[in-house]
């Protein structure tokens, strides 16, 4: 099984390298005054495929692990509840106030629900960064004490 996975990873790497070379050294199409790379959409689609594959793998394998070893899934549920609690807290803290844009046609982004979701993401990111920073400091201090 390990050999098959290794071949699969090498194949993904080779395809990614081909798309990267095509993107940077590929043909360009001139439309009026604009110069547009031909392979940009293919490059982006390949990125979407890789991102979807990563999401699917990162969701499926923990589920398989939880099914095969339910005793160890207790920590996973605790972490999942903590992440959900952080997002709920972030949503409650997000103001979602309208923003004053200076550009023309920018009013379409001045929607309270969209602004509330963006604020939620920003606040959650700050909380997760704070937790990561505290965890790094804790790890270094506990390592120095031992």
Image: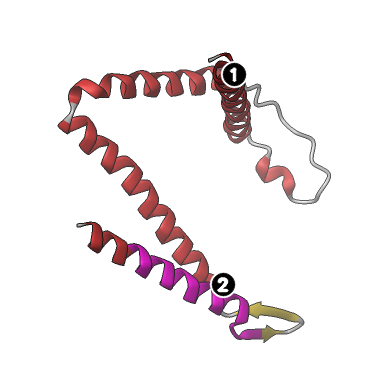
Q: Secondary structure at mark 1?
A: helix
The percent position of residue 136, horizontal first and vertical second, equals 58, 25
Q: Is residue 143 left or right of residue 96?
A: left
How far apart in space, not on screen, are marks 1 and 2 (Cα)? Answer: 49 Å
Can you say whether 20 is above or below 1 in the image?
Answer: below
Residue 40: which disc? 2
Give the x, y percent position of residue 132. 57, 26
60 left or right, relative to 111: left
**Mark 2 falls on what kind of element?**
helix
| Disc sitting over residue 144 in the figure | 1
Q: Nearer the viewer, mark 1 or mark 2?
A: 1
**In the rendered structure, which segment of residues is drawn in magenta?**
9-29
Lateral position of residue 91 relative to residue 2, left or right? right
Which comes before the other along the chain, label 1 or label 2? 2
8 up-or-down from 146: above or below: below
Q: Residue furthest right?
A: 102
Q: Position of residue 26 (x, y in %)?
A: 59, 83
Whether residue 42 appears in this view of the structure is: no
Which residue does the image show at 21% across and 38% down from the upper left?
Answer: 64
Is 18 magenta? The answer is yes
As displayed, is residue 130 above or below residue 51? above
Residue occupying the point 53% across, 17% down: 89
Q: Residue at x 53, y 15 (%)?
A: 146
Judged by its main secondary structure, the magenta piece is helix
The front one of 115 and 59 is: 59
Q: Is residue 27 magenta?
A: yes
Q: Where does residue 25 sit, x and y in percent of width and height?
A: 61, 81
Residue plotted at (33% across, 48% down): 56
Give the quadrant of residue 125.
Answer: top right
Q: Quadrant of the N terminus?
A: bottom left
* Residue farthest toward the top in the current orientation of the protein: 145
Looking at the image, the residue that sits furthest to the front is: 146
């Amino acid at each position: 099984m390990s050999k098959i996975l290794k071949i699969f990873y090498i194949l993904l790497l080779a395809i990614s390298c081909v798309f990267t070379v095509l993107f940077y050294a590929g043909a360009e199409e001139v439309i009026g005054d604009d110069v547009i790379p031909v392979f940009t959409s293919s490059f982006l689609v390949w990125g979407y495929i890789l991102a979807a594959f990563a999401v699917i793998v990162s969701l499926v394998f923990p589920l398989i692990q939880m099914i095969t070893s339910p005793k160890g899934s207790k920590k996973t549920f605790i972490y999942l509840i903590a992440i959900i609690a952080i997002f709920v807290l972030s949503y409650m803290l997000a103001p979602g106030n309208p923003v004053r844009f200076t550009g023309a046609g920018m009013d379409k982004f001045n929607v309270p629900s969209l602004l509330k979701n963006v604020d939620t993401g920003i606040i959650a990111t700050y909380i997760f960064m704070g937790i990561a920073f505290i965890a790094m400091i804790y790890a270094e201090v506990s390592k120095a004490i031992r």
